[in-house]
Amino acid sequence: MTRVLEVKDFNFSYPDGRSALKGLSFDISSGETVAVIGPNGAGKTTLLLALNGILRGKGSIKVEDLEVSGSNLKEIRKRVGVVFQDPDDQLFCPTVNEDVMFGLLNLGLSDEDVQRKTIETLKILELEEFGELLSHHLSAGEKKRVALATVLAMEPDIIALDEPTANLDPRSRRHLIETLKNIKHAKIIATHDLEMALELADRVIVLNKGKIAAFGRVKDILENAKLMEENALEVPLSLKYPEKN
Amino acid sequence: MGYGYIDRYSNIKSPVHALDPRVKIILFMLLVVFIVTTGDGDFAACLFYFIIIFTAALLSRVPLRYIFKRSLAVLPFVLLVAVFSLLNGKHEFLLNMLIRAWLAILALVLLSSTTKFPLILKALATLKVPGILVLLLSFMYRYIFVLLEEAVRAETAHRARYFGGRVLRQFRVFGHIIGHLFIRTYERGERIYQSMLSRGFDGSARVISKLKLKTADYLFSAIFLAAVIAVKIKDHL
């Protein structure tokens, strides 16, 4: 499998000097889904924003052999699509269509291509009826899927999602998880939803205080009660009580 | 969730709604300029302008009550200015000023309630209004209710723990709430900017516009222009 993302000894400190990410090294292959779990303030969101060069640190991040650097940010941001936790941050245009078009127009595509890709993407995510609607009037679940559409339309190599299932009711959560299953892109998902991690991820990174506490196959990590507890996590109930399933 | 719409009634179907937003913006702006530049004491002209706006309002099928109510919102500001003109001893301007301001705002309320806001933005962009201004307006439209919801939440949380007590102290609390809202808004702004950058924003706002003038647009423009120009030059006719 080809490597989509390679992070090597990456460090990031906030402007005030607080260290947020320390010596991170990992890689993601094409089509692979990696979950990033860990307590609040572990650096999950910071990591996602570093992947597309919004936050710049020391060390190396490569997206398909292209190093994140000041001169190629535009190409990097096309390749790494970030879905933000709060869709109200991501959907800043009045209508759904305009939000999906925003990224496409910034890529410099022709008007026809922009419109075609917008319609295609909304159709893939079963949002074709939503184009003319105002983002403000959508439900939380719909907003999340539109936020995903704005990124998917740009045909990234890897999608970075920040807490995709937060604040969703069970049905919307299920809908979103099934949608993510059908998207074959490489994904990196920061989340507290360990059941979703178990369902979607191939491998898991446990992040604590800016360091990788563990990185391995999803079941090996999530089953490890000691590791989970040490990092303010817990073994997912479906693994803890398998007899109930 | 959902505290209403800025552009209520902009979804109904009527000849006025169907017009090209660019046409409406230009014509209504022209009307406002004409109204504002009406000579002092020319009440006949004001009456004619009122009839023009009234006719357009009837055609638009927007409830007249709604347009009237919305237009009153501007009165406090106008009254304030009017009071100053009284202090200057120019009381003969007072009525004129009130009428002209009210007519102008009536025209703008009609424009905003017959045109979806996203369409107004598109039209402004096509009319070469600076992109940064269009973007600002667009953010205002998108986030005003998000902000309002946050404010209402903070106010509810305050009420949940307020059991009556010194009213003066509450002013301090409201100061805190406003400060809190400011910080939250600032942080949201940062996150929105990050999400814009993430999708390749480089400072220039790009739009696709599929706006096309139709026969009705030309027809309406011609009649509208003829009417307002006739009012403007009626003394020379």
Image (tube, helix red, strand yellow):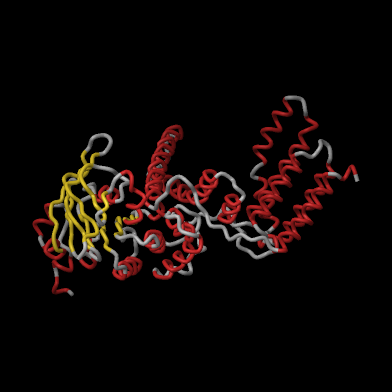
On the image, the x and y values in percent for residue B189 come to 41, 44
**A20 horizontally vs A116: left or right:** left
Front-lying residue, A99 or A229: A99
Residue B174: where, in percent of width, then height?
A: 44, 37
Residue A149 found in image quarter:
bottom left
| Residue A95 in the image: above or below residue B159 | below
Seen from the viewer's position, the closer of residues A231 and B65 is: A231
Q: Along the horizontal axis of the image, is A60 left or right of B156?
A: left
Residue B224 position by quadrant:
bottom right
User: Which residue is rendered at x = 18% and y = 46% of the image?
Assistant: A209
Q: Position of residue B153 (x, y in %)?
A: 42, 48
Give the farthest residue toward the left: A226
> Which residue is depicted at the point 21% across and 39% down?
A19
Looking at this view, name the residue that lies furthest to the right: B237
Residue A175 pos. (x, y %): 34, 69
State the residue lying farthest toward the top.
B88
User: Measuring 62% from the left and 56% from the top, which residue is drawn there?
Assistant: B115
Q: In this view, does A81 lie above or below B37?
A: below
